[in-house]
Amino acid sequence: MKSLKKEDIKQEVFDLYDDYAHNKIDRRQFIEKLSLYAIGGITVTSLLSFITPNYLDNLVVKPDDERIDSKYITYQSPKGGGAIKGLLSKPDNTTTKLPGVVVVHENRGLNPYIEDVGRRTAIEGFISLAPDALSPLGGYPGNDDEGRTMQRQRDRNEMLEDFIAAYNYLKNHKDCNGNIGVVGFCFGGWISNMMAVKIPTLKAAVPFYGGQPSAEDAAKIKAPLLLQFAELDKRVNAGWPDYEKALKENNVEYTAHFYPDVNHGFHNNSTPRYDKKAATLAWERTIAFFKEKLK
């Protein structure tokens, strides 16, 4: 079997995976279409294995990292799903109140990559909370395919309420200074945008390749935005011109970055869509933005 490298994969395969990951096609259709690219010693099995997330080998901050205190907690979401499980992470031996960051997962629940992002955020001097919107259904099931299926069973506006409740949990936490930001990826990018719409006191929002709110909703945003986009992400980017127009018309503070030649999901280091250069720069910008806005 040929050992695959990122440069062996045609852009159409990444686009196909994006359609599958966002429920545009089912698994049977995905496999059928993927077979068209199984040529020249590349098999469907090798393609599927290569493009599937590999979480365990790509954790940046391990769960037992001695620099942080990281544990699961449960909080209440009165308008959403009720009892929500989340990973709460903060620097170890905290002696001062810290700014808070809500970390929002993609469309598949709280998987190991998002937990890792929560821990990475804590390493940088924040108290982070990464909730699992699948909590009412039993939580992230251990694989993304089932996670996507489960998340489709929930109403996205109810899930939005779960993340707003996470904001309130952090706001009232004894180790938090009350200044809260949000960072989210894909579905979590939409949640980040919508939290900026719904929470007047939110201090900062960083949506990574997230869907955009309506012009009417955009007019309600008070928080400064740092918007991270992938140049090859035609699906999400199509909504940007209208969103930017609304932000400008309403004098919303924002900065948008488009990372060249990268795909939707470029920050996720567990898949071949990951782009190290773009992901590193985007994360550096995210942390600097939070340090500026959440003082």
Image (cartoon, helix red, strand yellow):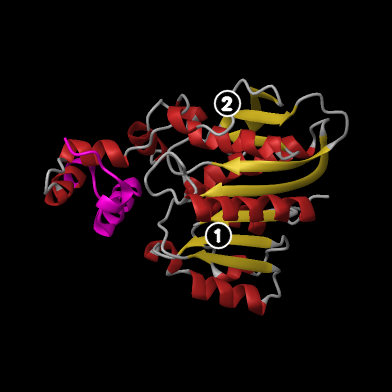
Mark 2 vs mark 1, foreground winner is 2
Residue ID for mark 1: 228
Q: Residue at x 32, y 38 (%)?
A: 52
Left or right, 74 with reference to 151: right
Whether 21 is drawn above or below 256: the answer is above
Tell me the kind of residue under disc 2.
Lys
Helix, strand or loop at disc 2?
A: loop
Range shown magenta: 1-29
User: Furthest residue to the right?
Assistant: 96
Return the residue nearer the eye: 125 or 108. 125
Tell me the kind of residue under disc 1.
Gln
Return the residue nearer the eye: 135 or 187. 187
Left or right, 240 with reference to 16: right
In the rendered image, residue 95, in percent from the top left (x then y), is placed at 87, 28
Return the residue nearer the eye: 118 or 8. 8
Left or right, 7 with reference to 66: left
Other-residue count near label 1 (Cα within 10 Å), few / some / many at <14 / 14–19 / ≥20: many
In the rendered image, residue 243, in percent from the top left (x then y), is placed at 55, 71
Q: Is residue 250 magenta?
A: no
Would you say the residues marked 2 and 1 are in contact, meaning their CB atoms lie under 8 Å apart?
Answer: no
